[in-house]
Every structure is written in structure tokens, then in C-alpha cells.
Image: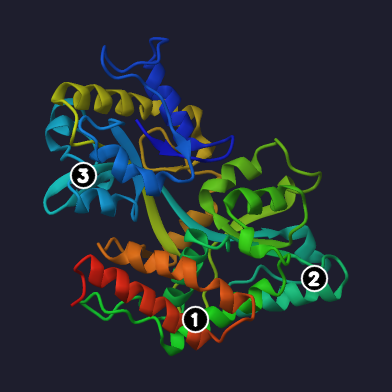
Amino acid sequence: MHHRQRPRRDPVERLSRAAGDGGRGRRSASDTVEVTANQTTEHRDIQVAALTADPAQYTSAVVANSSIVPLLNDGLIRPLDDLIAEHAPDLPALNRITIDGEVMAVAFMANAQHLYVRTDILEQVGAEVPTTYEEVLEVLAAVREAGIMDHPWAMNTASGWNLGEEFVNMILGMGGTLFEPGSAEPAINSPEGVAALEMLAALNEYANPDFLTFDSNATQALWESGELAMAYMWGSRGGGILDDEGAAEGVVENTMLVAAPTVGGGDRPASTLWWDGFTIAANISDEDAEATFVALMNGLRPEIITANNDAAVWLLAGYTPGAPAAGVSATAEAGATPYPMLPYAGLMHTALGNELAQFLQGEESAEQALADVEAAYIAAARQQGFLE
């Protein structure tokens, strides 16, 4: 098995542990499948090599909307229909990620980035909870002007995947698109793309100057230390933030999770909806595939979900939505769009993550940064045959 790195309250780690003990107090799924977990932030980079090996290095990879694509492209994961029919016939359609008529992953939790606010600080400046990014900027200015905080804002803007994701969220919120409709041709160097970059720059005027290093662990740590008035973070961080561990005094009771803001007069939140789920490797025996499937479903049984209720926005029986789920639920209900599960979306995401930092450092214009992204993307898409 193989899964991603998360902090100490990681819901995926809880799945792994529950799959491993099976209620039987042991860490194996069968005589040939041992339950171990490779927790690494490099999972997107190593999963293809790990599952290309024959037999595969891991029998399962935990994936999301985007990271399943390279595994699908290379035929490295197997259809799950037969295993579901035999071992989980009542699995709801919601959990069955179906590609070309075959179930290729079992989704077990939902995620989205949204706004976290400190209600006590908003009260100090007489502000309501903002619903647009333009209002977010007004509140941040008020907090700074009142001398409460110099750097009251954070979002996941670390160079690389995180920065690319923030641009995707913002351009979709602006009403723009990543690609020309029905094609792999890029469409980001647009008025909406420029406006998205300008909003990211305006927001990060209120962030600590090292914002290009901010990943989820960094933003969560800043929030729990009480150094932020507002932040834009993954919903999956809500459980860890709202528990009683590690936060400075006054943070937990004044933290509210609300929908992602709209931007630029748009009516959809500037956020994308994600699912996390498990896949089963193609290059393993049918017996190992079955043992892995049974172990992972065992880790998702209702009593496990109930016992870990607030660790995630679960998509399974046994879950009762609580305060940590409020932001994801509100963002989904407000009409946020799913992250595009297109075979070439990952190439665009990589180009965005690699090419936008210079603009945010003030070293080039928005138009130049977007032109650089498109050039990098086109080169990669041609190399892989998505563009002529």
C-alpha cells in the first residue's frame, strides 16, 4: 500500500492503521500482503515508478482527482468492479469513481480549500465574515491598520504544486478556463488569468514575506500559533485545527470554517472540489489485489469512520458532519467546480507551479508569467502527444 504525507491527525493514516489491524491485532492483509505506509510528499512523483514495477512495489495507491490520471494513462491500476461485487455490493455510487464504465477508485473523503477566519479578530475591527476576495482584502487592511497583525493572511503558495493549485482555484473563480473548450490548447493567458494573478499578489501583500514556502503544514502551524486573522486552507486541516492539541490560547474557540470566497463578481467559490480514494495496482496477483481491497474496505467500516468522525469530510456510512466539515460543505453547496480530471491537466498544473513565482516576487509581469506557463505547458504537451 502507498499513501500520502499528512500531519499528525491524518485521516489517511487512520485508514491505513484500521486496514492493517483488521480488528485482529495484526498488520497484514494476507500471507503475502503486508500493511505498510510510505508517507511522502513526493507521492505524485514516485507512484508511477512504484506501480510500473512487476510485481508493483505497492498493492495500492491513495490518490485524488489529479494524481489518479498518470496511473490511468499508463494502465497501472485495475478495475474494481468484480471486487466490489463480491466484497462491497452495497457501496454507494457516490464512492465509485467510474472511468469509461469501470470503477477505478473507491472515494472515501471529500476536500476543498476554503476560508478560515478568526471571529475575535474580525470583531475587533468591526468586520463581518467576508464572502468575496475583495472583502477579504478590506478586512486584512483593517487588521493591519489597527496594528493587530502585520501579516494577517496565509494560503498555500509554496512554489510548485501548491502555487499551481491556488492559481487554478482563482482563475476558475474569475470565470476563466485552463484550456480551450474541448481541446488541450492552453487558455490561461487571458484577462481572467491576469486578474487571478493580480488577486494572488494583492492577498500575499498581507502574508509573511516567505509565503512562497507555505505548504499545508506551514499554514496550519501559523494558524495554530495564533499569527493569522484569515487563511485559505484545505478542509482536511479542519479536524487537526479544531482539536485541542497544539493551538495557542484563544485560537480554537475563535476559529470558524466558512465557504471559499467568490472573486471578480463571479458567483462560484474560487475553489475546486476534490475527492481522495484508493486504487489497486494492476501489476499484482489477483489474490493480493483481493486481500488489499478487503483490508482497505475493512479500514473504512462504519465504526472506524465514527471513531474518526472529525478527521475528514468522509463520504461513508458512520459519518456525521461536524464543525470541521462546515467549510467544505458550504463551498460545495455554493457551486464550486470539481478539479478537472483531464489527462493533460497535470502538465498545466506543473507548468503553473514552476513559472508563477517570479511574478509574485515582482520580477516579471503577469502577462509574461502566463506566457512562460503556456510555453512550458505546450512543450510538455507536445512531447506527450496531447498537442501537435
Q: Quadrant of the C terminus?
A: bottom left
Q: Quadrant of the N terminus?
A: top left
- Closer to the chain start, of discs 1 and 2, is 2
Check whether the beta carbons of the residues at disc 2 and disc 3 lie within 8 A of each other: no
Mark 1–mark 2 Cα distance, whole angstroms, equals: 31 Å
Give the image location of residue 355, x and y in percent: 49, 72
Marks 1, 2: nearer the viewer: 1
Give the image location of residue 387, x and y in percent: 21, 75
Check whether the beta carbons of the residues at disc 1 and disc 2 lie within 8 A of each other: no
- Viewer can see residue 252: yes
* Amino acid beneath label 3: Met
What kind of colouring is applied to the model shown? rainbow
- Crowding near the residue tagged with mark 1, few <14, some 14–19, many ≥20 C-alpha atoms within 10 Å: many
Marks 2, 3: nearer the viewer: 3
- Closer to the chain start, of discs 2 and 3, is 3
- 330 in relation to 17, above or below: below
Check whether the beta carbons of the residues at disc 3 and disc 1 lie within 8 A of each other: no
Residue in the picture at 39% in, 20% down: 20
Give the residue number, with chain letter if any, for mark 2: 143
- 310 in relation to 209, above or below: above
Mark 3–mark 1 Cα distance, whole angstroms, equals: 36 Å
Q: Which mark is residue 71?
A: none
Q: Secondary structure at mark 3?
A: strand
Give the residue number, with chain letter if any, for mark 3: 104
* Amino acid beneath label 2: Val
Give the residue number, with chain letter if any, for mark 1: 369
Mark 2–mark 3 Cα distance, whole angstroms, equals: 47 Å
* Amino acid beneath label 1: Ala
Q: Secondary structure at mark 1?
A: helix
Give the image location of residue 195, x and y in percent: 52, 85
Tell me if 326 is positioned left or right of 47 in this view.
right
Give the image location of residue 136, x and y in percent: 65, 73
